[in-house]
Image (spheres, rainbow, N blue to C red):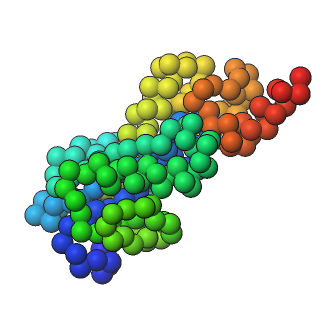
Amino acid sequence: MDGVFSTKTLVAGVDEAGRGPLAGPVFAAAVILDPLRPIAGLADSKVLSESKRDSLYILIKESALSWSIAQASVEEIDRLNILQATLLAMQRAVNGLHIQPDEALVDGNRLPDLSMPAQAIVKGDSKVQAISAASILAKVERDKLMVEYHQQYSDFAFDVHKGYGTKQHLAEIERFGILDVHRRTFNPVKTMLMRQKKF
């Protein structure tokens, strides 16, 4: 799983969750794993079951040398665009680590503005254990918020679709309207808003 991506001692893995949904913040996490406390089963959060993610989430928090979870709000996503908001959340996550890493390994092909050397690694969440760990923390934390959204907005099954543009979610928006937690610059929300303004 871990190719030779870094020879530095303290490496932070960085990943995000929630770039694509129509609702909610984008989350990012940074994790510095402890080489003396390896965690079995780390993988890209998208290929793991919910129960496996939840158990690894607890293990990562218990075993890592340092971890941090951050987010960029719906307002920041709409103001900056989703890429810049994602990079901002990643920067916040790395800055939130209580140990300064020697290097950050970031999933994807773009780097946030960081104070230490960094590498972007495409599909890093399936190649680098620290990035896998970050992807799990970001995903589980975001899913928890979606469950809270469902409790707050019971007409919307955020606990099921997690804010993604599923057929069910689109039907809910058509029926119950656009919420404060919806991203107004994302289609089809943007189109619906423009349509409403015409009437």
Residue 27 as seen in the image, left or right of residue 195: left
Q: Quadrant of residue 115?
A: bottom left
Residue 179: image x %, image y %?
Answer: 63, 25
Give the position of the C terminus as an image quadrant. top right
**Which residue is at the far left?**
36
Q: Please report the residue visible at 38 percent of the width from the left and 44 percent of the height from the top.
A: 70
33 relative to 8, above or below: above
| Residue 123 image offset from top left, x and y in percent | 46, 68
Percent of width and height locating residue 17:
46, 49
Q: Measured along the vertical axis of the image, is residue 105 above or below residue 32?
A: below
- Residue farthest toward the front in the current orientation of the protein: 115
Between residues 194 and 134, which one lies in front from this camera angle? Answer: 194
Q: Residue at x 23, y 43 (%)?
A: 58
Q: Position of residue 136 (x, y in %)?
A: 36, 50
Residue 82 or residue 141, whichever sits in front: 82
Q: Can the viewer see residue 135 in this picture? A: no
Q: Looking at the figure, which quarter contains the N terminus?
A: bottom left
Identify which residue is drawn at 22% across, 59% down.
100
The structure residue drawn at horizontal position 83% and vertical position 27%, both measured from the top left corner, is 197
